[in-house]
Amino acid sequence: MTYVEHRDTFDEELKLLLEAIYFKYQHDFRHYAFSSLRRRVTLAMQRFGCRSVSQLQDRVLHEPEVFGQMLQYLTVQVSEMFRDPQYFRTLRAEVVPVLKTYPSIKLWIAGCSTGEEVWSFAILLAEEDLLDRTLVYATDINAESLQAAEAGVYALDRVAQFSTNYLAAGGTRSLSDYYHAAYGGAVFDRALRSKVLFADHSLATDTVFSEVHLVSCRNVLIYFDRPLQDRAIGLFRDALVHRGFLGLGSKESLRLTSHADAFAELSATSRIYRKC
């Protein structure tokens, strides 16, 4: 059976799959955008040789290793270093000067995936002489992605784009100053992660982190439905200190969320907001 051929049945079985995952593994995908889930679950069915979502559900429930692999399909892991360079340029010009007024800084990178943004922030903070007094929380629900993020090893054929983004983002050196080639990839300087705490955290079920000065959560909310978007933004609002900063992805906005009035727009083009 394919989604196109039997849409109604597919959707009903998909809802049951998400319920089963929640009750079996306590991972809550029930408020993820359905359009995206359909595509990813269809790919998972092909990967595991299942003709229906129900067959996939049976394997997920009885084979924990299959669920571990399913997470790679249910969570999106598309990122690059200094993605959307204007975002980092705006942070450097308008947010960093404020952060420099604090004796210590806490930063939360929510949905950090495989860590490209974590290492980008670490480089930016190091160049602005802020890394030593900053604690970075890097969170995701995907344990495999967190391991990759902590390793900081990326394919060499991706580094050219990383370097282009870095310079466009206002980088003050050469990106090659921060990595060396080994293990068939670019290995980023371990000193950059000395202030980073990698942790399992779900925006769907977990509570807030302690008071932070900046939350960066980009290209995550687009995969949530409206109630889950509201929950996530509420977590960010509660986690931020007074006048703290929130950065979103280029296609994301606070405009239609129930917490829009809690923030003022700092940069419309870079999607950076400030808690009122």
Image (cartoon, grey):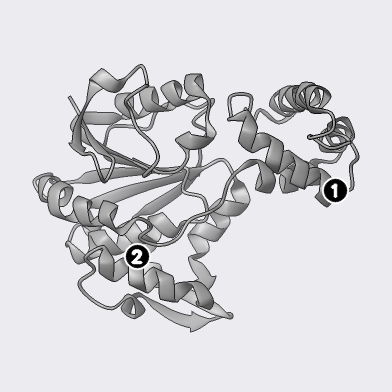
Residue beneath disc 1: 48
Label 1 vs 2, first from the N-terminus: 1
- Can the viewer see residue 194? no
Which of the 4 image quadrants contains residue 30? top right
Which of the 4 image quadrants contains residue 171? bottom left
The amino acid beneath tag 1 is: Phe
In the image, residue 82 sits, relative to residue 244, either above or below, namely below
Would residue 80 appear left or right of 34 to someone viewing this image? left
How far across and down, in percent of the image, does residue 62 sit? Answer: 87, 35
Residue under the point 49% across and 59% down: 150
Residue under the point 21% across and 34% down: 244
Which of the 4 image quadrants contains residue 89? bottom left
Say the numbered circle drawn on residue 192: 2
For mark 2, does the 10 Å Cα neighbourhood hold few (<14), some (14 to 19), or many (20 or more) residues? many
Q: Mark 1 against mark 2, which lies toward the viewer?
A: 1
Q: Secondary structure at mark 1?
A: helix
- Can the viewer see residue 197? yes
